[in-house]
Amino acid sequence: MLLAETVVLAASLSVVSQPTVVEIAAGNDQFSTLVAAVKAAGLADALAAEGPYTVFAPTNDAFARLDGEVVEYLLSDAGRSDLGRILLHHVVPGRLDAGVLVGRDEVTTLADTTLALEVARDRLLVGEAVVQTADIAGSNGVIHVIDRVLLPPVQQSPLESLLVNAIERGAPMFNNNNPEACAAVYATALEAVAAVDGFGLDAPSRATLAARLEEIAMDADVTERAWSYRRIMDALLSGQMQMDSRSRPASGGTGRMLYDFEDPSSVRRFGVVVDGVMGGLSTGRIRSGDGTLIFDGETSLRNNGGFSSMRAALPDGSCEGADALRVRFKGDGRTWIIGTRGSRNMRGDSYWTRFDTIDGQWMDVVVPIDEMVRTSFGQPLRGRITPDQVRGIEFYIYDKKAGPFRLEIDTIEAVTGGGAGNEV
């Protein structure tokens, strides 16, 4: 046999003998939950195909961090579709080893979602997860072991996508003293919902909506028109076709609402980031309360951890013209941090202010934005952020204490003329 033919045959045999990414996972006990999930979702054959694929593989310990009832649901027939999307959120087309990943800001997954990439303290971070072991090679791809299950963003229905986009366009107009433009944006979106049979409303509901829009259009007060449209949008987003004319509670004439958690979609805009990015074991979850956002979990000081946080982006100009943030909350007796960021992707430095809570008591805190302290990995730095630069907001429990925590938030506003401090 010629030497060239021998080399080709050897290479061919090597490829054939090398296991696929699915076979690698199936042969490793630390991936037993992942393998069960892949089989339950019907993805085993697809991921055993030629590929190549880059798989961010959560360990059994990573799955154990999820609520047991959630895992049980995902492994059931009813949860198969959601499970499939979650698993595809962990798979990227192509063979991307760690050396390639560290040079990128993000990757696009087979779920048509994106995962942010970052290097911090010599660790490769994928979304909220830390890569524990990199570059496990298979015949059809590469595996990177991660310590968290990565949850994709909530899929928006066509109705929610239309209304959320309209609110993101219209709200800054209203806040910049242009309620007429805001009302026009809101009206256009709602007229589309009333006219088109594709947004989940039946014919009688669309007829009711169209009649209500005609009534609102007759209102000479453009500010009230904008609020009337917004109340309908909030009702549609929350699944309630309520078109009443109740006035929204005022906030003293100086507040601009950033988040009112009567709207469940506002809750879904927040995401959790815990100390797993540095090897810690703290937990955190976000859920809807009775018109509120509830953030709870447990901080652990093991592995130099000790923090849990939740974060959300803000549209450009959300805080422009204001000078402070006002939060209505009920705490747990621990000291919390409210932070801002100048980037919507939540990278870069944070600007922090600490505030105290009284267990079980509703309170207000008013935080001057230009007095927030620039912070990186908990260390204060020089520099301040101005209201017009604010593109994100976050809350941290980071008081060097271990144990359960709970923060319930009613509203978050950008205000003018606010003095710092807690108010009952």
Image: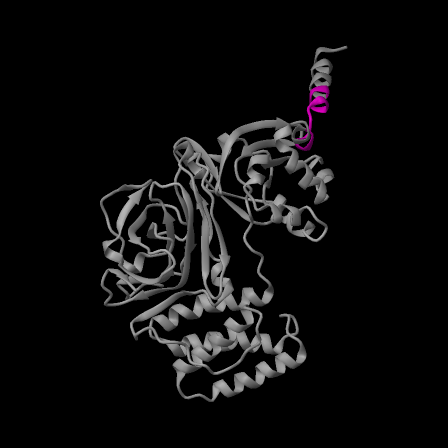
Up/down of 424 relative to 72, above or below = below
**Residue 11 left/right relative to 328:** right
Q: Residue at x 49, y 67 (%)?
A: 263
Q: Is residue 125 above or below residue 6?
A: below
Q: Position of residue 15 (x, y in %)?
A: 69, 23
Q: Position of residue 36 (x, y in %)?
A: 69, 38
User: Which quadrant of the figure contains the N terminus?
Assistant: top right
Q: Main secondary structure of the magenta part?
A: helix
User: Which residue corresponds to the image point at 71% horizontal and 43% vertical from the top-left?
Assistant: 40
Q: Is residue 105 above or below residue 28?
A: below
Residue 22 is covered by the magenta coloring: yes
Q: What colour scheme does the image use?
A: one colour
Q: Is residue 206 above or below residue 399?
A: below
* Quarter location, residue 258: bottom left
The answer to which quarter of the image holds residue 319 is bottom left
Residue at 57% of width from left, 86% of height from top?
A: 211
In the figure, is residue 272 to the left or right of 319?
right
Say whether residue 59 is visible. Answer: no
Residue 106 is a magenta residue: no
Tell me which residue sits at (59%, 32%) in the image. 143
Q: Which quarter of the figure has residue 388?
A: bottom left
Q: Which residues are magenta?
A: 13-23
